[in-house]
Amino acid sequence: MVRPTNDVILVRYGELALKSRHVRNRYEKTLMSNIRSMLDAMDVDYDDLSREWGRIYVHTTNPAAVGAAARVFGVVSVSPAITCEPTLESVASTAADVGESIINENESFGIRARRSGNHEFSSRDIGVACGDAVFERVRELNPKVDLTTPDREIMVEVRQNKGFVYTDVVNGTGGLPLGTQGKMVALVSGGIDSPVAAWLMMKRGCEVIPVYVNNEPHSDDTMRQRALECLSVLQTWAPGHPFNAYEVPNGISLDAFLSNCQRRYACIFCRRMMYRIAAGIMEKEGAFGIITGSSLGQVASQTSENMMAETCGIHVPIYHPLIGLDKTEIIDIARKIGTYDASIRPAMCCTAVPEKPATAAKCGEVCSEEDNLDVDKLLMDALSGAKIIDPIEYS
Ligand code: ATP
Ligand code: MG
């Protein structure tokens, strides 16, 4: 028996269930529109999408839609399913068709039944009717019923107007629908960490505005290209939400720091300038915070003391989603999301990094050194040189 064709994908989402009716409605609409954009961006044919309380359906027989829907932020799991009538007869005969196509000799099977809506039967009745029908259909294979650890599992769901039979539950990316948590500026260098940090916040529903700080002549085009390549991968996670990515020149202010301040503080000054730049773009774009790829202790300069010195007097919310992660955990995510290969391409290292960077910078000292410079002017110059990166460069 050829297995009946799956004609729908059940899309489940998690945390939305915790929201009020109004918020949930809005989130569900965003999620639906994001699923549509993902299917379109991945060139996956589908007939239609529909929504009912707590569930989205992608109507399609195209197996490629499973992976596309699972990739969308906010989706907890998906199941390709066969639609049938919401009656015991219909679900039982469909379950038997499916059972016949997957159960081998001497294997055990179990039915997982669920029901919602008003029906004249219970979920237990569904389990019994489907179990009997499957058993009868494959009787000569000597099947066994096992509800605890069956070799084959058949899921049967009866909702008010439809029944569904399926066997697979594919994990989704999870998180919240992109676009439901406001905007944030993401400082993206193109290294392994910052694209992962931006992705994690996208996963939590934030639209990100990537900012690449161009430190030429202390960096070169290899670094810029690496950052652009990371953006192109990140953009594939956010179809329907095209980035407004910025590139901001910071070489002149870096030079000013290098010639007027203690060399060992170079990275701290540079980071403080990046935060000010990001804060400027945040304001312009109506965003609510800055995201970095800092991870505590990962490199000698990422100490808690330095992190405090980097932000003293800079009053904007700065998020470091990787702060408590190990490098191996960050690399695992980078591989999973596809930015790793771009991030490890050979690129120049910043020539302004001192041989012995400070590991315990003092806020007072950092701020008084900055007083030797016209930081406001340097910031204004940097921001006036800010350019939106043409999406062609990272598409
Ligand atoms: P990454 O792997 O993201 O480069 P890192 O571990 O090398 O991070 P640093 O170079 O100390 O750490 O930078 C810390 C964070 O500062 C980066 O994760 C990123 O968010 C931001 N950053 C550093 N350089 C740049 C840059 N040129 N443009 C934009 N953001 C940057
Ligand atoms: Mg780096």
Image: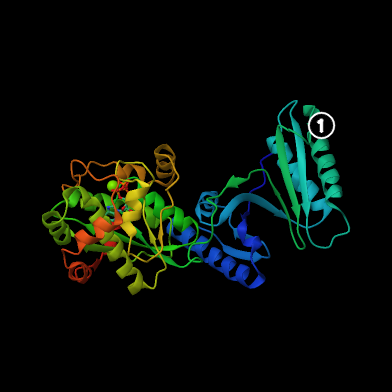
Comparing 365 with 122, the one in front is 365
Comparing 107 with 133, the one in front is 107
Look at label 1 and name its amino acid: Arg
Q: Quadrant of residue 270?
A: bottom left
Q: Which colouring convention does the figure follow? A: rainbow
> Is the distance from the Cβ of mark 1 to the nearest ligand 1 atom less than 8 Å?
no
Badge 1 local density, few (<14 within 10 Å), some, or many (20+)?
Answer: some
* Image x and y of residue 321, in percent: 44, 52
Comparing 374 with 211, the one in front is 374
- The residue drawn where x is 85% and y is 45% is 129
* Image x and y of residue 244, in percent: 33, 66
Name above or below for residue 359 compared with residue 310: above
Comparing 87 with 206, the one in front is 206
- The residue drawn where x is 73% and y is 39% is 99
Q: Circle 1 sits in a helix, a strand or a loop, which is it?
A: helix
User: From this viewpoint, is residue 151 visible?
Assistant: yes
From the viewer's perspective, tell me whether residue 22 is left or right of residue 300: right
User: From this viewpoint, is residue 44 visible?
Assistant: no
Name above or below for residue 124 compared with residue 205: above
Q: Quadrant of residue 108?
A: top right
- Single out the residue that lies furthest toward the right: 120
- Single out the residue that lies furthest toward the left: 259
* Image x and y of residue 145, in percent: 81, 33
Q: Which residue is identified by label 1? A: 139
